[in-house]
Image (cartoon, rainbow, N blue to C red):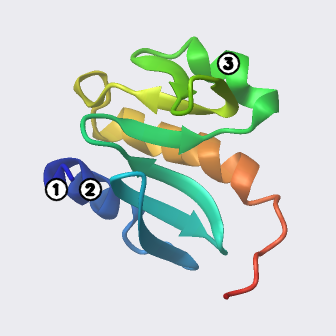
Amino acid sequence: MNEALAARLRKALAGRRRIAEKKMFGGVCFLLRGNMLCGMGEDKFMFRVGKAQDAAALKRAGAKPMDITGRVMKGFVWVDPKRCDARALKRWIAMAEDHVGKLPAKEKR
C-alpha cells in the first residue's frame, strides 16, 4: 500500500463526519455512511463519482476509467496523483461526495 497517498486522502478528509477507513483492493478506501467514496490503489487515487458524472470526471486532468476486472466500472475513476495537487484533491472529493452523499446509508455488518 502507498502510505503517502493514503496520508494525502486522510488529510483532505480530516474533520469530515461519518467517514470510515477500510482496507480494500490492496489499498485503502474511505466510506461515507458505509458507501465507498474514494481511496487509493498502489499508485493512484480512486473516486466514486457516479455514472451521471462519469463523462465530466474523465475530462479532468489525470483521470482514467477504473478497470479492475477487465471491464470498465462506470462511475468510478482512477486519478494520477502527480496531476492532483491539494486543491484538485478537494475538488475530486467534492465530486464524489455529491454522488455518494445522495445514496442511502448502509447498515454496519
Is the residue marked by circle 3 packed among few (<14), some (14-19), or many (20+) residues within 10 Å?
A: few
Q: Which residue is mark 3?
A: 56
Point 42% across, 75% down: residue: 15
Tell me how far mark 1 sits from mark 3, CA to CA: 29 Å
- Disc on the earlier residue, 1 or 3: 1
Q: Which residue is mark 2?
A: 6
Which quadrant would residue 95 be assigned to in this image?
top right
Is the residue marked by circle 2 packed among few (<14), some (14-19), or many (20+) residues within 10 Å?
A: many
Image vertical order of residue 9 relative to residue 90, above or below: below
Tell me how far mark 2 sits from mark 1, CA to CA: 5 Å
Q: Tell me the SS state at disc 1.
A: helix
Q: Amino acid at mark 1?
A: Glu
* Residue 31 point in image, percent of width and height: 56, 66
Is the residue marked by circle 1 packed among few (<14), some (14-19), or many (20+) residues within 10 Å?
A: few
* Residue 71 point in image, percent of width and height: 64, 23
Q: Amino acid at mark 2?
A: Ala
Q: Tell me the SS state at disc 3.
A: helix
Circles 2, 1 touching at the beta carbon (< 8 Å): yes
Compared across the picture, whether 50 is left or right of 79 comes to right
Q: Which residue reaches farthest bottom?
A: 109
Viewer-nearest of discs 2 and 3: 2
Q: Which residue is mark 1?
A: 3
Q: Which residue reaches farthest front?
A: 70
- Disc on the earlier residue, 2 or 3: 2
Point 67% across, 88% down: residue: 109
Q: Tell me the SS state at disc 2.
A: helix
Point 16% across, 56% down: residue: 3
Tell me how far mark 2 sits from mark 3, CA to CA: 25 Å
Front residue of 51/86: it is 51
